[in-house]
């Protein structure tokens, strides 16, 4: 099956990439450049794809940045909040409608290469904060993807009800090179260890009982 | 009510702009630059907005063009088909998933300015050819728009079951300056009169029993 993966360069979508290949999919990977604060993830994405020979494209949607107000990930005047991922202040990290934009671009690519599906790595840990990672959103957008063209595009989201810890554990079995992934919202040289994304990653590695090669 | 209008610069969205203002909406207009063959519509869009003092932005999504293969409107090697709009060969003019992309960008803008709705001018004449103008697609994508963020965004599509003739007639009453709109898929100096878009526009003006200032 041909699948277009939304690949941020983070650990969830990296595990998804390995998972799709493990089951035999012909995968293409799409990253989106929206001038995110943690642009470093784009380099990780292309590095990992180059290593395993997966076609990788970066769509520059930075023109939409003008509409993505009020997020610490697109607005340098807003500091990345520290603390736990599920806390109220993590709402600051939400980029308005980012996932619909990425899914729309991935769906266009899927149509043009006659792929059957788009895949993205939303998981249970995202649900508390990110509306566009919740089951009801994924159902609605899949329905739109099935209807938007002459041939339907399915939305694969196999990790929807898994925790990040479970994903991490699966990735260990699939031999995902976690040293080539990036999670921290700050996007500096080393992970900050303080933002919600870092904390969630730490908890995931603790659950999987392995050490994070980035730390 | 605050509304973000997807404004192509064509006659349907121009009538929708006048309709929304007639009922008192505070309208912002969004055009999308995907390096379409008929880029002239973008100049028409900004000209019309400037005339009536409506905020107008153009989002450059040309990076997505790499995924929009196989359409006469994005691929210069494919000629614009001539003939009637509802004919099979008009499928060549379909830009894959264009409307989901535009709606995603408009929804992001709507969220950032705390608007309640996004409006777009799909109509009954589009249904035969464009899957992403059909009632079931608009329902699905509206559901996704209602769920994609903390506050729901509605999708206004008041012309969904109207013909282009009916829209044209309404626009005459609303005093839409049709000379500032652009419809032809060729995007040359004058309308070609031969493409499906031109033919449909001619039929609409015939139905409305007025002459087209562009002809």
Image (cartoon, coloured by chain):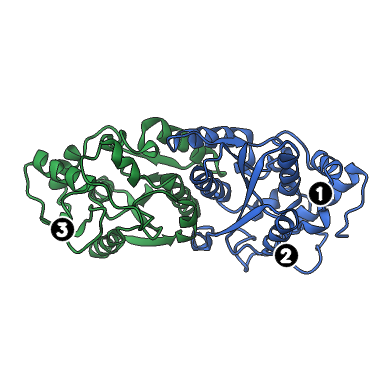
Chain colours: A blue, B green
Q: Which residue is mark 1?
A: A176
2 vs 1, front mark: 1
The chain letter for the residue carrying disc 1 is: A
Instruction: Looking at this view, name the residue that lies furthest to the top.
Output: B136
Looking at the picture, tell me which residue is in the foreground, B76 or B32: B76
User: The C terminus of chain B is located in which quarter?
Assistant: bottom left
Residue for badge 3: B179
Image x and y of residue B12, in percent: 25, 46
Mark 2 chain: A
Report the disc number at residue B33.
none
Identify the element where label 3 is drawn.
helix
Q: Nearer the viewer, mark 1 or mark 3?
A: 1
Q: Is residue A16 visible?
A: yes
Dot 2, crowdedness within 10 Å: few (<14), some or many (≥20)?
some
Is residue A86 visible in the rendered structure shown here?
no
Residue shown at the point (83%, 58%) measured from the top left:
A179
Residue A198 coordinates in the image, percent (x, y):
80, 55
Q: What residue is shown at x 21% (from left), y 56% (from top)?
A: B181
- Circle 3 packing at 10 Å, graded few (<14), some (14-19), many (20+), is few
Mark 1 and mark 3: Cα distance apart in space: 59 Å
């Amino acid at each position: 099956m041909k699948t277009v993966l939304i690949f941020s360069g983070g650990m969830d979508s990296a595990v998804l990439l390995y998972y799709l290949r493990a089951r035999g999919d012909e995968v293409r990977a799409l990253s989106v450049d929206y001038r995110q604060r943690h642009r470093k993830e784009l380099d990780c994405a292309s590095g990992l794809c180059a290593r395993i020979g997966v076609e990788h494209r970066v769509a520059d949607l930075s023109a939409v940045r003008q509409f993505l107000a009020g997020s610490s990930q697109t607005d340098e005047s807003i500091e990345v909040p520290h603390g736990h991922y599920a806390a109220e202040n993590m709402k600051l990290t939400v980029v308005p409608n980012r996932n619909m934009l990425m899914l729309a671009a991935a769906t266009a690519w899927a149509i043009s290469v006659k792929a059957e599906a788009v895949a993205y790595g939303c998981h249970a840990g995202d649900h508390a904060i990110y509306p566009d990672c919740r089951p009801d959103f994924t159902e609605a957008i899949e329905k739109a993807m099935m209807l938007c063209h002459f041939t339907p595009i399915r939305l694969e989201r196999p990790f929807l009800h898994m925790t990040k810890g479970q994903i991490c554990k699966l990735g260990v079995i699939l031999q995902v090179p976690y040293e080539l992934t990036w999670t921290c919202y700050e996007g500096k040289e080393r992970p900050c260890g303080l933002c919600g994304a870092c904390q969630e990653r730490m908890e995931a590695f603790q659950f999987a009982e392995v050490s994070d090669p980035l730390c």
